[in-house]
Image (cartoon, rainbow, N blue to C red):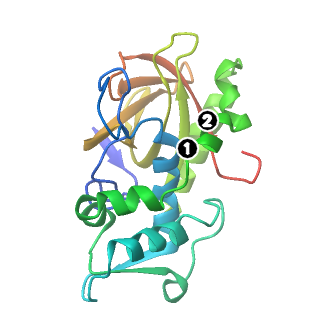
């Protein structure tokens, strides 16, 4: 039987993007391929959560203006404290990020930051580092504390040296089960259609990919991302 967190921090299909980060291998030759933006998209979820608000009652604006509003919402570092509602970037004419990104997909993509610095960020190299059970337990405990405080958590997840999963997801909810496992519910930029999940074995103190897009179930390692200026 699962025990829920106080409340999900995000509403899947509401506070998430309507379009995916696309796979190069699955979309070979596709024009205008939107690939390798998983770090950008996941980070932007936190930035919209902290720094933007939607005003569906307000008149819609042009696509160029939406691009600028997205650029403003994603210009603040995600580790900064959330802004008061009156200081947030106002997105008029839409009720949610999902609606905005579905209707104004190209404008939203144009306003999101580039992918280069997400590729070369020094913290990405942690996928090659060994981890301790205590360190992984600390990651899950910090994640649960952040969710309880109402803040989404971005994780770098990997099963390196297998060249399959070097990726990022946003944790927005969790369930604690009787026995040894708990479940982290995640938004995966590669799959806007349904939530994913990552399990944590509290006895072995390790993560397990139970439902991560296009990834075989198995042991993984997880690291927090973009929660301080250095990490």
Looking at the rendering, which quadrant does residue 99 occupy?
A: bottom left
The image position of residue 93, as x and y in percent, is 27, 81
Can you say which quadrant of the picture contains the C terminus?
Answer: top right
Label 2 to label 1, Cα distance in Å? 6 Å
The image position of residue 136, as x and y in percent, is 62, 29
- Looking at the rendered structure, the secondary structure element under dot 2 is helix
Q: Give whichever of 163, 135 is nearer the camera.
A: 163
Q: Give whichever of 217, 15 is nearer the camera.
A: 15
In this picture, residue 94 sits left or right of residue 184:
left
State whether residue 141 is above or below residue 71: above
- Residue situated furthest top in the rendering: 162
Q: Give whichever of 187, 150 is nearer the camera.
A: 187
In this picture, residue 84 sits left or right of residue 192:
right
In the drawing, what numbered circle is on residue 119?
Answer: 2
Query: Residue 7, can we see it?
Result: no
Residue visible at 48% across and 57% down?
112
The image position of residue 74, as x and y in percent, is 54, 64
Can you say which quadrant of the picture contains the N terminus?
Answer: top left
Residue visible at 29% across and 48% down?
19
Residue linked to disc 1? 115
Q: Residues within 10 Å of mark 2 (few under 14, many from 20)?
A: some
In the drawing, what numbered circle is on residue 148?
Answer: none
- Looking at the rendered structure, the secondary structure element under dot 1 is loop
State whether residue 104 is above or below residue 109: below
Instruction: For the residues labelled 2 and 1, say whether their Cβ atoms are less than 8 Å apart.
Output: yes
- Residue situated furthest right in the rendering: 230
Q: Residues within 10 Å of mark 1 (few under 14, many from 20)?
A: some
State whether residue 107 is above or below residue 154: below
State whether residue 89 is above or below residue 147: below
The image position of residue 137, as x and y in percent, is 61, 32
Query: Residue 127, can we see it?
Result: yes
């Amino acid at each position: 039987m699962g025990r829920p967190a106080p409340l999900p921090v995000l509403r899947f299909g509401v506070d998430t993007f309507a379009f995916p980060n696309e796979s190069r291998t699955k979309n070979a030759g596709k024009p205008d391929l939107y690939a390798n933006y998983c770090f950008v998209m996941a980070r932007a979820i936190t930035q919209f959560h902290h720094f933007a608000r939607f005003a569906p009652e307000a008149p819609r604006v042009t696509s160029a203006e939406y691009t600028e509003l997205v650029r403003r919402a994603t210009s603040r570092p995600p580790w900064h404290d959330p802004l008061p509602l009156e200081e947030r970037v106002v997105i008029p004419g839409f009720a949610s990020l999902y609606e905005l990104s579905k209707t104004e997909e190209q404008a939203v993509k144009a306003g999101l930051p580039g992918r280069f610095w997400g590729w070369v960020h020094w913290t990405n190299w942690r996928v090659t580092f060994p981890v301790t059970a205590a360190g992984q337990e600390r990651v899950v405990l910090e994640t649960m504390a952040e969710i309880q405080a109402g803040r989404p958590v971005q994780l770098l997840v990997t099963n390196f040296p297998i060249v399959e999963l070097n990726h990022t997801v946003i944790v927005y909810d969790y369930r604690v089960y009787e026995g040894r496992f708990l479940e982290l519910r995640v938004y995966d930029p590669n799959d806007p259609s349904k939530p994913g999940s990552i399990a944590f074995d509290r006895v072995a103190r390790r993560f397990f990919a139970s439902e991560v897009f296009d990834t075989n179930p198995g042991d993984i390692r997880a690291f927090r991302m973009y929660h301080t200026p250095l990490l």
